[in-house]
Every structure is written in C-alpha cells, then in structure tokens.
Image (cartoon, grey):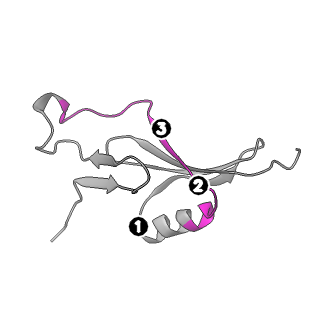
Amino acid sequence: MQIIASTVSLTRTDAVDIVLLARGIQVLPPEQRDQHAAGLILAFTLDTGLQDQERRLRDAGVEITMPLREEPWGERLFQVTDPNGVIVQFVEWATPDNA
C-alpha cells in the first residue's frame, strides 16, 4: 500500500500558517485543481542550523533539488520543489569571505 500526502501544513505559534495542497485534491475548487505554480519561490530564513535542516530533510526522503551552497555575497541556501512546482528555499546569511 502506498500513501501519498495530499497536504502539508507548516505552522508556528508566532507566525502565519502555510498549507501546500497536492494538485487535483478535491478540496480545491475545480478551476484551481490542476494549476501548476510558476515563478514562485517560498523562502524561509533560518538564524542557524541550515546544514542540519538540509540533512534532516534528505534523511526523511525529501529530494533536494538544489544542494546546499554558499553564494559569494554570503547567502547559504538549498532548495526543494513541491509536486506543484513551488520552490521552497531555505536560507541562512553568513559573512562573505571578501567582506
């Protein structure tokens, strides 16, 4: 038996709720059920622990669509992509080497 998640809900008591629904799910109005996201990046900025989060998601079986990397301007990030095409980016700021 294969179980496929149709929703993901990210909740924090000090922030807004974010709910991602699988395309085609019946709770969506018919005109929204088969839409794909395009050009959307949902970014979460972390204070610390970016590498730990990347490892935790990878170990949980999440496909990392852009591996952890550090940009020259000090942005450390990695990305995953949900089934609807929404890019979810996790970011941590570091002091660049040339600062």
**Mark 1 / mark 3, whichever is N-terminal:** 3
Task: Look at the numbered disc 3 and give the secondary structure of its residue.
Answer: strand
Task: Look at the numbered disc 1 and give the secondary structure of its residue.
Answer: loop
Q: Point out the frontmost of discs 2 and 1.
A: 2
Which of the image's four quarters has the N terminus?
A: bottom left
Asked if the magenta segment contains residue 97, the reply would be no
In front here: 1 or 80?
Answer: 80
CA–CA distance in space, label 2 to label 1: 21 Å
CA–CA distance in space, label 1 to label 3: 21 Å
In front here: 15 or 87?
Answer: 15
Q: Position of 97 compared to 4: left or right?
A: right
Q: Amino acid at mark 1?
A: Gly
Q: Residues within 10 Å of mark 2 (few under 14, many from 20)?
A: some
Q: Which mark is residue 61?
A: 1
Residue range highlighted in magenta: 32-52
**Mark 2 / mark 3, whichever is N-terminal:** 3
Residue found at x 38% / y 46%: 16
CA–CA distance in space, label 2 to label 3: 16 Å
Q: Residues within 10 Å of mark 3 (few under 14, many from 20)?
A: some
Rendered location of residue 15, percent (x, y): 43, 49
Q: Position of 34 compared to 82: left or right?
A: left
Rendered location of residue 64, percent (x, y): 49, 56
Task: Look at the numbered disc 2 and give the secondary structure of its residue.
Answer: loop
Which of the image's four quarters has the C terminus?
A: top right
Q: Residues within 10 Å of mark 1 (few under 14, many from 20)?
A: few
In front here: 5 or 48?
Answer: 48
Q: Which mark is residue 87?
A: none
Q: Decide: is 61 above or below 8.
A: below
Q: Amino acid at mark 3?
A: Ile
Q: Position of 70 compared to 6: left or right?
A: right
Find disc 2 in the rendering and name its residue.
Answer: 46
